[in-house]
Image: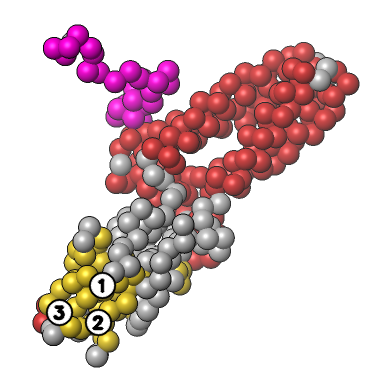
């Protein structure tokens, strides 16, 4: 207790102890690490990687697809509980839609997770339980559909209800991974850089063709001197936050060392995924031997 008599410990939310226990369960690593490595190997580079990552869409595909699976299964269970036997056929069709949508949803999700887990033990473990819960929910809804079509609606409803409860844990962990662990959002969104001219480096500090990381204000910026030109883009990769200045230069593109995303040095645009969001880019000027930068264009509110 504090001197005032009030507890200084934060009250936990109902599911927070469960999440903490999952994230601290080192035993899960024995399964999660090889699974994630296999996924990265199978989906390394190319059009399939870009497709499942959402490069073509401009943001991750997985969250959008989860709405189809969860929405279909939840709607089926609500019809079971509120609609009666006359809506049994509609429930079956909704379950079938959820089952059909599960495959691409799981593929896009495990792809996002596999790219993030090496840097964060909590993400690795929570992601494995998230996927396992969803797979168990799928199995229960599949059994529910089979049972219904064999004429045992009551048992099918029960299996679906249990499946919905299991999916609830999976959905909660999915929200936790996205909103609390930052898996999926643009890693530069809260730090796009200043729209004012700020000093970045001495001109003599830059070596031609060699990416250089500097901090401008609070923003990490990658500078590259190319002949008489100097390019500047946000140094934190929008995909998973790796430093772009550690990457490889290929013409006027920088290739992220972590997952191979390519960005145009001139405007930060994505040239190849798995990144989905462009890098904030900066205007550059030389004022008496001091390189100054400002954000290329204001970010819309």
Q: Are marks 2 and 1 in contact (CB under 8 Å)?
A: yes
Query: Considering the numbered disc 2 on the image, is that residue within a helix, a strand or a loop?
Result: strand
Residue 85 on image: x %, y %: 85, 18
Q: Determine the residue positioned at 37% across, 40% down.
A: 181
Q: Which residue is mark 1?
A: 197
Name above or below for residue 185 compared with residue 30. below
Q: Which residues are magenta?
A: 2-28
Q: Which residue is mark 3?
A: 290
Query: Considering the numbered disc 3 on the image, is that residue within a helix, a strand or a loop?
Result: strand
Q: Earlier in the sequence, mark 2 or mark 1?
A: 1
Q: Nearer the viewer, mark 1 or mark 3?
A: 1
Depth order, front residue of 89/294: 294
Depth order, front residue of 279/62: 279
Residue 91 on image: x %, y %: 78, 28
Q: Nearer the viewer, mark 2 or mark 1?
A: 1
Residue 6 lies in the magenta-colored region:
yes
Residue 253 seen in this snapshot: no
Q: Earlier in the sequence, mark 1 or mark 3?
A: 1
Name above or below for residue 210 compared with residue 144. below
Residue 261 on image: x %, y %: 40, 65
Residue 30's quadrant in the figure?
top left
Residue 86 seen in this snapshot: yes
Residue 23 lies in the magenta-colored region:
yes
Q: Determine the residue positioned at 31% across, 63% down.
A: 193
Packing grade of label 1 (10 A; few <14, some 14-19, many >=20) is some
Q: Earlier in the sequence, mark 2 or mark 3?
A: 2
Depth order, front residue of 54/199: 199
Q: Which residue is mark 2?
A: 285
Depth order, front residue of 139/11: 11
Q: Determine the residue positioned at 25% across, 78% down.
A: 224
Packing grade of label 3 (10 A; few <14, some 14-19, many >=20) is some
């Amino acid at each position: 207790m504090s001197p005032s008599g009030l507890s200084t410990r934060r009250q936990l939310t109902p599911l927070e102890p469960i999440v903490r226990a999952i994230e601290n369960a080192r035993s899960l690593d024995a399964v999660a690490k090889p699974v994630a490595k296999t996924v990265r190997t199978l989906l390394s580079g190319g059009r399939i990687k870009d497709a499942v990552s959402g490069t073509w869409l401009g943001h991750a595909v997985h969250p959008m697809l989860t709405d189809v699976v969860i929405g279909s299964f939840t709607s089926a269970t609500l019809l079971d509980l509120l609609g009666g036997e006359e809506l049994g056929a509609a429930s079956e069709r909704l379950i079938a839609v959820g089952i059909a949508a599960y495959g691409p949803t799981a593929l896009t999700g495990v792809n996002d997770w596999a790219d993030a887990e090496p840097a964060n033990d909590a993400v690795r473990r929570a992601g494995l339980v998230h996927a396992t819960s969803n797979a168990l929910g799928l199995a229960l809804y599949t059994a529910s559909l089979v049972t219904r079509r064999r004429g045992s609606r009551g048992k099918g409803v029960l299996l679906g209800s249990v499946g919905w409860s299991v999916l609830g844990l999976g959905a909660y962990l999915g929200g936790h991974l996205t909103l609390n662990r930052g898996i999926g959002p643009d890693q530069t969104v809260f730090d796009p850089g200043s729209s004012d001219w700020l000093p970045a480096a001495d001109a003599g500090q830059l070596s031609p063709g060699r990416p250089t990381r500097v901090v401008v204000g609070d923003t990490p910026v990658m500078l590259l001197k190319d002949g008489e030109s100097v390019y500047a883009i946000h140094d934190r990769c929008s995909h998973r936050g790796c430093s772009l200045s550690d990457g490889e230069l290929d013409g006027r593109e920088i290739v992220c060392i972590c997952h191979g995303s390519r960005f145009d040095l001139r405007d930060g645009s994505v040239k190849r995924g798995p990144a989905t969001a462009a890098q904030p880019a900066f205007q550059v000027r030389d004022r008496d031997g001091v390189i100054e930068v400002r954000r290329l264009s204001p970010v819309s509110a």
